[in-house]
Amino acid sequence: MNALAWRVPGKRSTGALLKRLGKRLGTVEAGRVALERVHLDTFDGRLWRRGEVVEAEREVRDEPGPWRLRRRGPRDGASRGVLPVAALPRVAADVPPGRWRDLLADSLDVRTLIPRAWLQVDAHRLEVRDGRDKVVLRVDLETVEGHPAGPAGVDRGTAHPLGRWVLLRPVRGYDGALADALSALEAEGLEPLQHDPFEMALSAVGTTPDAYSGKIEVELDPDQRADVATRQVLAAITDVLLANVEGTRVGDDPEFLHDLRVSVRRIRSLLGQLKGVFPEAVVARFAPRWKWVGEVTGPARDLDVHALELDALIARVPADQRGHLEPLRPFLAARREAAHAALVEALDGPAWRELVEDWQAFLRAEAAARPTAPRARQPIAGVARQRIRKVYARVLREGRAITDDSPAEPVHDLRKTCKKLRYLLEVHASVLPPDATSRAVRHLKKLQSLLGTFNDQDVQIHALTAWSGALMQAPGADARTLLALGVLVDGLRRAQVDTRAHFAETFAAFDHPKVAKRFDALVAPPEDP
Amino acid sequence: MTVLATYNLKGGVGKTASAVNLAWLAAEDGLRTLLWDLDPQGAATFYFRVKPKVRGGAKGLVRGRHDALDAVRGSDHDNLDILPADFRYRHMDRVLHDGPDGKKARRRQLAEVLDPLRDAYDLILLDCPPSLSLTSENVFDVADALLVPLIPTTLSVRTLEQLLDFRRQRGLALSVWPFFTMVDRRKKLHVDLLEALPRQLADVVDPEAGWLSTVVPTASEVERMGITRQPLGAFAPGTPAFAAYRSLWSEVRGRLGWGPSPWDEAVSDATAR
């Protein structure tokens, strides 16, 4: 409930209400103004999740004026500060150093701030003044239309009337005026808004500020047919995937492409792992096409990661050499732009469009009464357990085969197998013992973290080495650039050796009787009641 | 939290106008700003239409009987609050003298009043009374810099010399940033002294971080602040006087290492709400 925002019922006349409030509170009219108000947050509502609402507001004029950002609490509406900005900020660096930048830096991580909802506001402004003509309270009666923004914050969607409300803007130190206003609004029969205006703007299209999550949480019935259950899970993964397409097209928030690719990997993993659940023809029809999606999105993602890590990479070389690596920035940016353009071309093309159509048709299709796939009608819980048992055994086999002298390839293979195991655990969590599952995932995460670091280092070494020739032709690059690059790659190689040196102990911690016990508990059939 | 103080031993040189306009500009930049009107005259408080009353007066605040935050009043402008004047501040020196033993402790009493406000504000501006007293010493102790407005006359500049002498005698690590106000370029004396005084005082005013180069002209709009009871930016944003204060604020931001104002790039006239 927002204590400072009160709903005006549909049947109440605006003019009459203004007059009555004027009488009760002794308000003076301070003008009527048309406002544009934008709720800013990340796609997954990171500001909302930490109890912050950031809205930008400006008057509607022929020449648009500057924006004012306002921070407030979601449930009480109390203002936490106002900041003028020339343009809507997208990242922390778009606002001056200070509390605002700290808030955004803490909250956004790698995501960008996007318009989540646009409001068109017709505001009647009232002021309560004291005997010194000092404003002691502001009262705004607003008639509001909301336009939820598209997934990437780009398009404005359809306008929905959100209704009318009275917004109270208290002034510090004048609590009496606020108390009088609250009593007056109660006496007028108004009630506080049950939801924040941000929530109301998004509920018009059936969503909430923090609705999006990349996690797959599907409640499965353990006895459900495996093919039906797996279609459910694939549908949930596909929803996440499609939710990230527009943001991927826009390209300035790397998490969209990241989440899209994770979804593709999950789809490919399930199609590949749950053998016998779907007919071979279905797998043959879709597996290569999802593989293609993984391939066309890979280069752009790799370059996103390089861009995100560039500052940390440059910081690895001695301070007097860092400046010589600056040509890497425009070099990377140009490659990233080209990769992104290629990605968008693929998403605009018929192969992608047809894949999505065919895939959705497959997901919607009724399950066959007599399926040809041998495991289609088996209960999903049993199929999942059996598969997890096999992949877990494979992780152990592959890990045990790796020695200090093994090349990098088996380490990368192990990383991929661990990912498959992780996806199986996560998407089938609802049919597995909850405690055992979460503990198993915890152990697996530690191993995956080391393998991921090893892979990242490998990718960086290979990329920097492969680019060295082209980088030398880049503007501003010279022999010192190459030398600094050499120092950087050398440092990365040493770091990778260090990572690899920790493999044995990290794997040993996973290949431990305690962990084996967790997995045994996971994959054991449930006891008869 | 940064503390600045507008200070001059001489009255009527533009301390309050400077404090009020700089506070408004800071708030417009998005900084949570508090203006404490330490002058029992209460001119800054008057400009913001706030009642010049603080529960318990100087004693209540300094002895910690009443929380300074409880005395704060929001102005009519976003991000800008006022800790009002109170006529009982005329007893401030006596209250401070009757405080704790020890010279250092007695000079820190106003700092202790402000300590609880550190998290609530980015900038506190102190509008000081024209005196050189224990109140002033408390201001010197807590302020990160003194902004010293000077009318380019011999008498006004004498007071700067007196301040700098005081600083030197007490060995105070105090930044003093003088600037010229109420300048009338039709007066030859003003024009001559504008040029001569910085040179004359070069030995005692730090050339790197001393004189602020902005010159604030004499202007009827500044006098009209007393009628409109608003900062210049709220009613006269297109005037040379406001432009001068904006320039002054930019210089102060630069000295504090805060970079340019968000308004410097895209917006040339301030929007009054």
Image: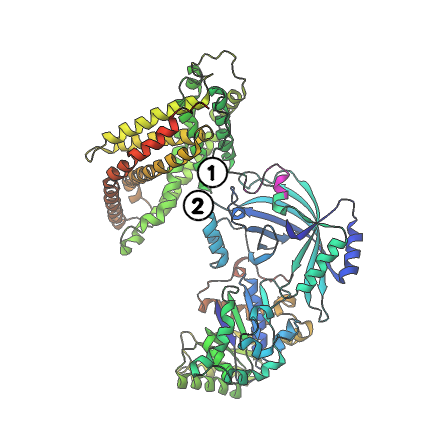
| Neighbours of disc 1 within 10 Å: few (<14), some (14-19), many (20+) | many
Chain under disc 2 = A
Q: Are marks 2 and 1 in contact (CB under 8 Å)?
A: no
| Neighbours of disc 2 within 10 Å: few (<14), some (14-19), many (20+) | some
Protein image colouring:
rainbow
Percent across and percent down for residue A527 are 42, 24
User: Mark number for residue A269?
Assistant: none
Q: CA distance from mark 2 to mark 1?
A: 10 Å
**Position of residue A481 in the picture relative to residue B28 (left or right):** left
- The three-letter code of the residue at mark 1 reads Phe
Q: Secondary structure at mark 2?
A: loop
Percent across and percent down for residue A152 are 53, 40
Percent across and percent down for residue B245 are 55, 70
Q: Secondary structure at mark 1?
A: helix
- The part of the chain drawn in magenta is A200-210
Residue where numbered disc 2 is placed: A110
Residue A254: quarter of image: top left
**Same chain for marks 2 and 1?**
yes
Residue B167: quarter of image: bottom left
Main SS, magenta residues: loop
- The three-letter code of the residue at mark 2 reads Val
Q: Nearer the viewer, residue A142 or A350?
A: A142
Q: Quick check: B44 above or below A10?
A: below
Chain under disc 1 = A
Residue where numbered disc 1 is placed: A256
Q: Quick check: B137 above or below B69?
A: below
The magenta stretch spans residue A472: no
